[in-house]
Amino acid sequence: MTEQAPTGNQLVTDKLFAAIARKKFKLASILIEGGVKINTKLSSGITPIMAVCDSIVDEDQRHKKKKLLLCLLDNGAKINAVDKSRRSALHYACICGDTSIIQLLKSRGAKSNIRDLNEQYPEFYLDCENLTSPRRRSFSLTRRDSIASMMNIPTAYRTWDSREFLDSILE
């Protein structure tokens, strides 16, 4: 079985994911305004809006991240789409811990009643460091750039790692 060469649109879509992963938000906005497919998915089911919600940025980039998120939403990004782990953009925003992004998503119609494969609502991931439930007390969530690094959490709680993400779009 021979592998087909990527189409021009696929190459542009890959560039969108790469721009988001590298935090080149202005380039990502230009690609979106240029008509790139914004509801496309990686093999893991991750969409561009999920990737943006997952990115951890410093204070200087926070405004650019929010502006890119608005650009995606204004151009028809599906806010309640789910990946293969049944996580939505709101799940990723909660994992990332950026309350301004969480509020923006909710104000634009993000559903907070979507459960992921672990039967968890997005808010479960918002503050795992201060959980009091005996069932969840052993979980330790530390934030890192591109998806939280979860220690002492079953594999099912992990989704995609930034290295796998970059490898999948740069191959």
Image (spheres, rainbow, N blue to C red):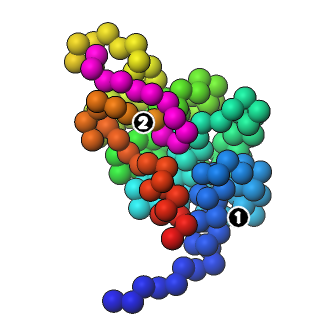
Tell me the element at label 1: loop
Is residue 49 within the magenta segment?
no
Among the two numbered marks 2 and 1 on one chain, the one whose residue lies closer to the N terminus: 1
- Residue 25 in percent (x, y) is at 72, 48
The amino acid pointed to by label 1 is: Gly
- Residue 1 in percent (x, y) is at 33, 89
- Residue 48 in percent (x, y) is at 57, 52
Marker disc for residue 114: none
What residue is shown at x 60% (from left), y 44% (from top)? 52
What residue is shown at x 45% (from left), y 28% (from top)? 142
Residue 137 shows in this picture: yes
Region in magenta: 137-147
Is 83 left or right of 54, judged from the image as shown? left
| Residue 29 versus residue 79 in the image, above or below | below
| Residue 78 versus residue 135 in the image, above or below | below
How would you rate the neighbour count of disc 1 (Cα within 10 Å): few for under 14, some for 14-19, many for 20 or more? few
The amino acid pointed to by label 2 is: Ser
Residue designated by label 1: 35
The overriding secondary structure of the stretch rendered in magenta is loop
What residue is shown at x 23% (from left), y 13% (from top)? 134
How would you rate the neighbour count of disc 2 (Cα within 10 Å): few for under 14, some for 14-19, many for 20 or more? some
Distance from disc 2 to disc 1, alpha carbons, whole Å, reads: 33 Å
Which one is in front, 154 or 29? 154
Residue designated by label 2: 149
Which one is in front, 166 or 89? 166
Q: Residue furthest top?
A: 132
